[in-house]
């Protein structure tokens, strides 16, 4: 059983986040309803996620396949969508396709092929985002900006995929102005992709606990927030 003080504190944190999200949207001349709050619940227990699902959180994001499986099977999201937001290994695609409402982290033709094949086997279209390595970091996954058009073209040619938009994580060491410039560039890339492939490319997933307000001001439609909702992660429980 979760401590009542913890759940009360989490409820207050979510209320504060929603207020700050709304303020950032209005400051940019946007409707706050345009921006969804994704709870990034890596390492969080089924009990913690169940408690947060009763709060004004729109969807849940998982970084690890086993956690997505565990929490969906347990009904921890209370009927809200679960997205996969971490690096997806091709040998685990079958466990994610059809289970995740949206796979946010697709970055290669090989992964496109695996997802398309798994979706065909289930006779469904899997919604995906293409992850862009907007900072050009060698240590980070995502397609380089120069390769995005080619990957979009490959994705559009697959019958069992539907590209909904783009996802990115700017460099962690970028300053505030540089981070906002990365977000602005992602908005431009989405507009270009939407003009070419259609208005259903309307999702821009960017912004986390430390920078989600800037992301919203630059056009984010999904912000992925973990520690600002749940508190610091305890990785020892998953060692």
Image (cartoon, rainbow, N blue to C red):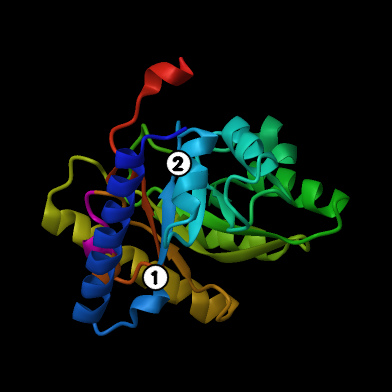
Q: Residue at x 40, y 77 (%)?
A: 33
Q: Residues within 10 Å of mark 2 (few under 14, many from 20)?
A: many
Residue 7 x, y percent position in the rendering: 36, 44
Residue range (magenta): 210-215
Most common secondary structure along the magenta stretch: helix
Does 211 lie within the magenta span? Answer: yes
| Figure check: 206 above or below 133 | below
Q: Nearer the viewer, residue 218 or 78?
A: 78
Do the CB atoms of the residues marked 2 and 1 lie less than 8 Å apart? no
Q: Nearer the viewer, residue 114 or 23?
A: 23
Relative placement, left or right, of 176 versus 182 is left
Number of the label disc, if any, that sits on residue 77: none
Splitting the image into 4 quarters, where does residue 24 fall?
bottom left
Is there any visible trace of residue 184 in the rendered image?
A: no
Q: Residue at x 27, y 52 (%)?
A: 13
Q: Nearer the viewer, residue 187 or 55?
A: 55
Relative placement, left or right, of 174 versus 204 is left
- Residue under label 1, please give it: 35
Is there any visible trace of residue 210 in the rendered image?
A: yes
What whole-number distance in Å separates the C-alpha atoms at marks 2 and 1? 18 Å
Does 235 lie within the magenta span? Answer: no
- Residue under label 2, please give it: 41
| SS under mark 2 | loop
Relative placement, left or right, of 28 versus 121 is left
Q: Along the polypeptide, which appears first: circle 2 or circle 1?
A: 1
Splitting the image into 4 quarters, where does residue 30 fall?
bottom left
Q: Residue at x 13, y 54 (%)?
A: 176
Of tags 2 and 1, the one toward the viewer is 2
């Amino acid at each position: 059983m979760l401590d009542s003080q913890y759940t009360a504190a989490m409820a207050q944190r979510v209320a504060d986040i929603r207020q700050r999200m709304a303020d950032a949207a209005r400051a940019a001349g946007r409707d706050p309803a345009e921006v969804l709050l994704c709870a990034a619940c890596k390492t969080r227990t089924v009990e913690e996620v169940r408690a947060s699902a009763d709060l004004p959180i729109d969807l849940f994001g998982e970084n690890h396949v086993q956690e997505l499986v565990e929490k969906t099977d347990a009904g921890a999201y209370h009927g809200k969508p679960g997205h996969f937001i971490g690096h997806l290994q091709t040998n685990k695609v079958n466990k994610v396709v059809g289970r995740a409402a949206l796979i946010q982290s697709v970055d290669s033709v090989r992964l496109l092929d695996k997802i398309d094949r798994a979706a065909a086997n289930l006779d469904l279209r899997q919604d995906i985002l293409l992850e862009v390595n907007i900072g050009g970091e060698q240590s980070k996954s995502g397609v380089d900006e120069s390769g995005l058009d080619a990957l979009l073209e490959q994705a559009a040619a697959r019958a069992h995929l539907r590209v909904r938009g783009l996802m990115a994580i700017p460099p962690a060491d970028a300053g505030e102005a540089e981070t906002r410039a990365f977000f602005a560039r992602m908005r431009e890339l989405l507009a270009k992709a939407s003009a070419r492939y259609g208005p259903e490319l309307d999702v821009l997933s960017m912004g986390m606990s430390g920078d989600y307000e800037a992301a919203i001001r630059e056009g984010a439609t999904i912000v992925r927030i973990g520690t600002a909702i749940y508190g610091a992660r305890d990785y020892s429980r998953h060692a």
